[in-house]
Image (cartoon, helix red, strand yellow):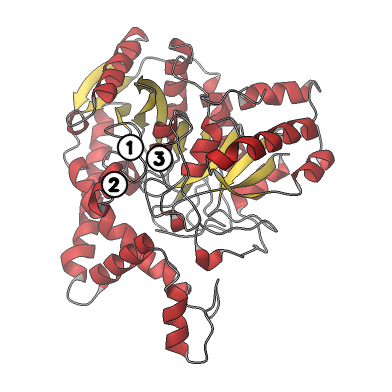
Amino acid sequence: MLAHELRARLARKELSPKEVAEAYLKRVQALDPGLGAFLTLNERVLEEAERVDPGLPLAGLPVAVKDNIVTKGLRTTAGSRLLETFIPPYEATAIARLRALGALVLGKTNLDEFGMGSSTEHSAFFPTKNPFDPGRVPGGSSGGSAAAVAADLVPLALGSDTGGSVRQPAAFCGVYGLKPTYGRVSRYGLIAYASSLDQIGPLARSVRDLALLMDAMAGFDPLDATSLDLPPRFQEALAEPLSPLRLGVVREALSGNSPGVERALGEALEVFRTLGFGIKEVSWPTLPLALNAYYILAPAEASANLARYDGTLYGYRAEGEELWPVVEATRGRFGLEVKRRILVGTFVLSSGYYEAYYARAQAFRRRLRAEAKALFQEVDALLLPTTPHPAFPLGGRPDPLAMYREDLYTVGASLAGLPALSFPAGFEGHLPVGLQLVAPWGQDERLLRVALAFEEATDRAFLRTPLGEAF
């Protein structure tokens, strides 16, 4: 059952919040040992369900939360041994807003350590598996959240997207995943990876469910200086008629894709033409190079953000009396991928290399944004694959550079700060295929309206729950 349908049943008192929480909790306990979607379950969720005010807009709706978003009193690890026992004394703004409307945090989901990865194989604890095929990855770094929603272990989930970490796992797991405009959702309480790119985003099995979460979370936050004063109106926007729009198909994303991705794109274009959309092939020349700039800028910011984990103030502290041996032993608990990105980031910021790498990458980022702005003078939204292929096998990307190329189509919107939405659009064999919509800055609602038109026109034909439904 979709979240907005479940909410309606809760409002009619056909189900109680405790009954819903119990059903999902039992489902997680039964099915998650084979998936590894959750790191921590909220042991107080049934008590919280009994106390929730039934008149609240989200009363009784369970939500899973990626484990790099802090939850007061509930363990938050960021998928790292350095925060293995961390119990936050405060709440992320997004979580506080959901709780205030009656939502229940069911638990914390697995991720690549500190959000660094594209497969959720780089968690310090265990990998997450794809519900459609346990021999394949769910994507990353929000793989736990995507897998939990796809398997209906929970109707709604939060992830974080730095270079595609909501959209790519959404595509691999056959669900919807939204990266909002940068600043649309407060980052307060999101453990930082790359601060100029990180953004909390929702995952769900329908567009209307995304709108539910965005209306609850989005909006200005005085605790986050980068948050935007754009009042959310997502559910209201979905109720408005959608006039035919101009859809730009990105030429640079049309080659090198698997047969299933090519087929899904072609069939989606036919659906949009039937709906009256104008279709135009457009060029975003810098998109193929965005990956290079991203893997300079994101590691550079990560090297600064993760410097705090030195055994003095934050997280795990190794035993010892001397400062530098303690720092070295503490940081030795970072996983290999995190160490790799810290080293890359430190190098590109170092004397003699800053101008050659970091400064040029920032100049490229400005050019990318300018090209995107010019594109949106021609079209109202862009369409391209989310990934070049469906989910790959566990262990199938041992080469780090091959893993980085998984972000080929997603990093452009991240670097430009634009809203982007991955939606289910087909299958390659038994594996889901996702397509991606990108809209102008601040036009997040437009993305949901276009995706809803596709969802209704195809009668949700691409939405499957491989392990059945909780309700």
- Label pair 1/3, CB-CB below 8 angstroms: yes
Q: Does residue 432 lie above or below 270 as drawn?
A: below
Kindly check if marks 2 and 1 are in contact, taking CB atoms under 8 A apart as contact: yes
Residue 254 at x, y percent in the picture: 19, 28
Q: Which image quadrant: the N terminus?
A: top right
The residue to which callout 2 is attached is 397
Amino acid at dot 3: Val
Residue visible at 48% across and 73% down? 309
> Residue 2 falls in which quadrant of the image?
top right
* Dot 2: element: loop
Whole-percent x, y for residue 130 in the image: 45, 36
Query: Could you say which is closer to the camera, residue 10 or residue 330?
Result: 330
Identify the residue at the far top of this view.
Answer: 274
Q: Amino acid at mark 1?
A: Phe
Report how far apart the C-alphas of labels 1 and 3 lie in the structure. Answer: 6 Å
Tell me which label, 2 or 3, sits earlier in the chain.
3
Residue nearest the observer in this picture, 469 or 358: 469
Q: Residue at x 47, y 29 (%)?
A: 175
Q: Amino acid at mark 2?
A: Arg
**Which residue is labeled 3 in the image?**
137
Q: Badge 1 is on which residue?
A: 392
- Determine crowd level at label 1: few under 14, some 14-19, many 20+ residues with C-alpha closer than 10 A: some
- Helix or strand or loop: what does disc 1 sit on? loop
- Whether 313 is drawn above or below 229: the answer is below
Check the image and report above or below for 315 versus 265: below
Q: CA distance from mark 2 to mark 1?
A: 8 Å
Count of all numbered marks drawn on residues in the image:
3
**Who's the residue at 39% across and 58% down the image?**
194
Regarding residue 419, the answer to whether it shows in the image is no
Left/right of residue 36 with respect to residue 253 in the rendered view: right
